[in-house]
Amino acid sequence: MNDTIKEEGKGTGIGLFISKSIVESHGGRLLIDSVVGKGTSVRIVLPLGK
C-alpha cells in the first residue's frame, strides 16, 4: 500500500500513517478503498464510548 498521494520527492507523506496510528491507538480502524479514476473512500471506525 502506498501511504501517500504526493508525487515522489514532494514532502514526507506521513499524514496517513499518523492518522492511522491515532485511530488505532483509540481501538479503531482506518478503512480505505480506492479505485483509479473513480476516487477514494475513507472510513474511520471507532468503538462506542462507555
Image: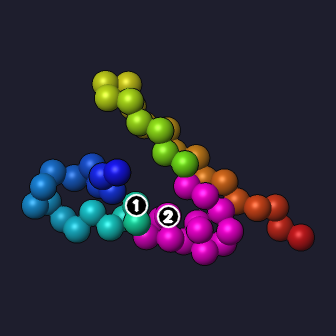
Name the residue at 65% across, 62% down. Answer: 28
Question: For this view, does 42 lie left or right of residue 39?
Answer: right
Mark 2 burial class by Cα count in 10 Å: few <14, some 14-19, many 20+:
some
Image coloring type: rainbow
Q: Quadrant of the C terminus?
A: bottom right
Spot occupied by residue 34 in the image (x, y as percentages of width and height)? 41, 36
* Residue 8, image x, y percentages: 12, 55
Q: Label 1 belongs to which residue?
A: 16
Q: CA distance from mark 2 to mark 1?
A: 6 Å
Query: Which residue does the image show at 22% across and 53% down from the upper left?
Result: 6
Q: Which mark is residue 20?
A: 2
Is the residue under label 1 in contact with that under label 2 (CB below 8 Å)? yes
State the image coordinates of residue 43 (x, y, percent, origin top left): 58, 47
Q: Is residue 23 left or right of residue 14?
A: right
For this orientation, the residue located farthest to the left is 9
Give how far across and how far down residue 42 sits, in percent. 51, 45
Q: Which residues are magenta?
A: 18-30
Secondary structure, mark 2, is helix
Q: Residues within 10 Å of mark 1 (few under 14, many from 20)?
A: some
**Looking at the picture, which amino acid does disc 1 mark?**
Leu
Residue 43, compared with residue 3, is above or below; it is above
- Which residue is rendered at x = 50% and y = 71% of the image? 21
Q: Is residue 28 magenta?
A: yes
Judged by its main secondary structure, the magenta piece is helix
Identity of the amino acid at label 2?
Lys
